[in-house]
Amino acid sequence: QKEVEQDPGPLSVPEGAIVSLNCTYSNSAFQYFMWYRQYSRKGPELLMYTYSSGNKEDGRFTAQVDKSSKYISLFIRDSQPSDSATYLCAMKREYGNKLVFGAGTILRVKS
Amino acid sequence: DTEVTQTPKHLVMGMTNKKSLKCEQHMGHRAMYWYKQKAKKPPELMFVYSYEKLSINESVPSRFSPECPNSSLLNLHLHALQPEDSALYLCASSQEIAGGGETQYFGPGTRLLVL
């Protein structure tokens, strides 16, 4: 079993839809949770960063962490065709440098 | 500014060539990383430098040789690569804070093709 599970998709939605992207994990030692967006042939871009449980909002993006369920989510409101990309969840322990990535979900927003 | 730069953007090399990838950041970060990413896969960690010292080597073959000349620069020297080494090579950097919590910022990557 992988430490971090993420559905690779693709997930196709119409423009303006609310998108929900999710990851589950098995290691209760993870404390830091990140979402990266990666456009084709580009490097990952940090979108959201959360410590422990709770919600964090930034513009159209909301990140949620439920440590009791070992489940994290990224919501995108009013999705745009420019949001079409691969979304990678990543997490790390309290100490150390190693990020553990999910497989990435391909999102396609159709106009 | 959260920019990590990488050169070259693209590289084609033969199996007998020697080449180097370069990475630079000016955010004052003291940890720098090399990742390898194959198509439709997440990044795989190769090396971590912390305060210019190699702290993690994820059992990477010796044909990949990292170097950290100073706190802003990271190189990856390539020699006698195999076609299966073709991939996107990503550099990242982060602060080094006691207690963790460092966010990693990625560069745009070097797309490497080994013929």
Image (cartoon, rainbow, N blue to C red):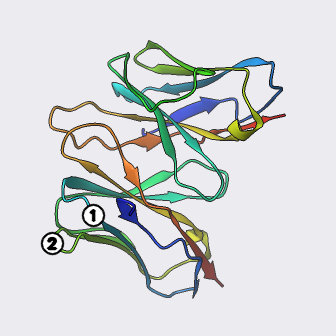
Q: Determine which of the numbered discs, if any, sits on residue A68 in the image.
A: 2
Q: Is residue B47 left or right of residue A31?
A: right
Q: Residue at x 52, y 87 (%)?
A: A16
Q: Nearer the viewer, residue B23 or B47?
A: B47
Q: Is residue A110 left or right of residue A56?
A: right
Q: Residues within 10 Å of mark 2 (few under 14, many from 20)?
A: few
Q: Residue at x 59, y 77 (%)?
A: A10
Q: Evaluate if marks 1 and 2 touch, with contact meaning CB atoms under 8 Å apart.
A: no
- Please state which amino acid type lies under the numbered disc 2: Ser
| Callout in the foreground (1, 2) | 1
- Please state which amino acid type lies under the numbered disc 1: Ser
Q: Residues within 10 Å of mark 1 (few under 14, many from 20)?
A: some
- Of labels 1 and 2, earlier in sequence is 1
Above-or-below relation of B72 to B86: above
Q: Label 1: which residue? A: A26
Res A58 visible: no
Q: Secondary structure at mark 1?
A: loop
Q: Residue at x 40, y 17 (%)?
A: B71
Whole-percent x, y for residue A15 in the image: 57, 85
Q: Chain of mark 2?
A: A
| Residue B75 position by quadrant | top right
Q: Chain of mark 1?
A: A
Above-or-below relation of A41 to B97: below
Q: Nearer the viewer, residue B15 or B88?
A: B15
Q: Are marks 1 and 2 on the same chain?
A: yes
Q: Secondary structure at mark 2?
A: loop
Q: Residue at x 48, y 73 (%)?
A: A7
Q: Is residue A49 left or right of residue B6?
A: left
